[in-house]
Amino acid sequence: MTVTVRFAPSPTGFLHIGGARTALFNWLFARHHGGAFRLRIEDTDRVRSTPEAVAAIIDGLAWLGLDWDGEVVHQFARAERHAEVARQLLTAGHAYYCYCTPAELEAMRERARAEKRSVRYDGTWRDRDPAEAPSGIAPAIRFKAPQHGVTTIRDHVQGEVTVSNAELGDRVILRADGTPTYNLSVVVDDHDMGVTHVIRGDEHLNNAFLQTRLYEALDWPVPEFAHVPLIHGPDGTKLSKRHGALGVAAYRDMGYLPEALRNYLLRLGWSHGEDEIISTEDAIRWFDLDAIGRAPARFDFAKLGNLNGHYIRQADDERLVGLVAAELEKMLGRTLGRIDCDRLRRAMPELKLRPKTLVELAQNARFLVAERPVIADAKAAKLLTSEARERLAALMPVLANRAWRAAALEETVRAFAAESGLQLGAIAQPLRAALTGSVASPGIFFVMEVLGPDETLTRIGDAASRRD
């Protein structure tokens, strides 16, 4: 059997983090088994579905590196096929016309609530002759679900789950206006797309029972199911925006790398021994459904940050230069020039060692592309006393014409401090404030080397000539 799976989001908003994990699990399962990963846009809700949401979903999947096979399937475009299958069920005696009016259905629900019964269709038209139908009423088509016995799902994650058939009810599969309902559309599309395994959130588990009966009534093979528990916040409650229930684009904007987010989402509910850092290649090699846990996973920004920091440290410097340059251009509102990018390139091996996001990395690199005069923040400004500025002015001619390497610059500044009867910090701290506008930066002599002699001496001169 060739494995075929699908990711089927509704385009009513962004690609949220739970949907991204579902897509990832499907993608990995397909790639692990050498099968196909299909994308279906379930856009039958014409009021809420938007082209912008479709674009956001496709963009989010592309950024995560989850490539799909074949053309994107749009469910709405297949509505006539769904209606055709509903009529096929009708002809085969597995469905029937229902002529109940909205008022009659509401009265039915009210009686059930008053009698404290489950609210479901009572089968009014299940066995009635359509010849009795009132005139002027367009009928819906209802699936004739079995009324006795049970339906059992053997789920790869949830195990064996059973529901009484009496709980299924005769659900509408084709509305009176001719539009198909969700469960019918899903079954028809999954069958026509050759889907062998349905991997989705466990909020869809209840749908699986009716869908199974639809497959059986159509004499179609029932796919295997894997219903994955939801993602909760770190406190165990439903995931909210403060916990991380954001769109994938928001994580990109916050400075997370796609490979880090893939790794983190993989570990939300799936495990491989004690491994935490798992490459995409290993994930494809190891992934299968039996390692998905039944308990809801808990989202933790701190763990995501630590993992992202690891991937930043491992990332190619040239790639990081491009990503950080783009962040800096957003921060500064201007295009970086060649000299700016050359400085970023020289500094990147040091700059990337500590930040946990690209935004943090860009903020730490901002001094490299700052326009002169560099504006010192409040802490740095306190270091630039009149005495400190005099020392910086005296240091400038000492630095001129020296070998411009970090080790040689450190030796020169240490010698200057010793000759002046000062500790190194008395020179190095004001020097850092003058060059970076901050009290925190990479090693100051490394900073001097990256900035180069002209920029370094000009910045020192700006600080030395500053007036209170």
Image (tube, helix red, strand yellow):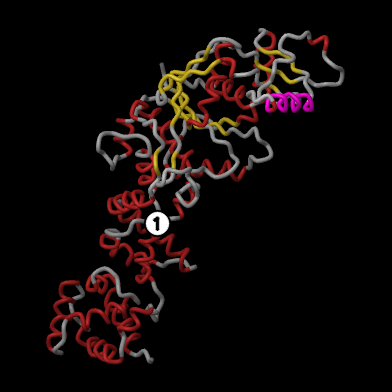
Q: Residue at x 12, y 85 (%)?
A: 418
Identify the image quadrant of residue 136: top right
Query: Is 270 rendered above or below residue 1?
Result: below
Most distant residue in the front direction:
115
Query: Is 79 rendered above or below residue 379?
Result: above
Of residues 28 and 397, the one drawn nearer to the viewer in this rendering:
28
Magenta region, main secondary structure: helix
Horizontal and vertical percent for residue 317? Answer: 30, 56
Horizontal and vertical percent for residue 266? Answer: 36, 38
Of residues 295 and 387, the one drawn nearer to the viewer in this rendering:
295
Q: Residue at x 36, y 49 (%)?
A: 304
248 falls in the magenta region: no
Horizontal and vertical percent for residue 29? Answer: 39, 28
Of residues 455 and 385, the one drawn nearer to the viewer in this rendering:
385
Quarter of the image with the N terminus in it:
top left
Residue density around tag 1, few if under 14, some if 14–19, many if 20 or more, within 10 Å: some
Going by the numbered disc 1, the residue's amino acid type is Leu
Query: Is 321 rendered above or below residue 432?
Result: above
- Identify residue for label 1: 323
Horizontal and vertical percent for residue 16? Answer: 50, 43
Highlighted magenta segment, given as a residue range: 102-113
Q: Residue at x 29, y 78 (%)?
A: 456
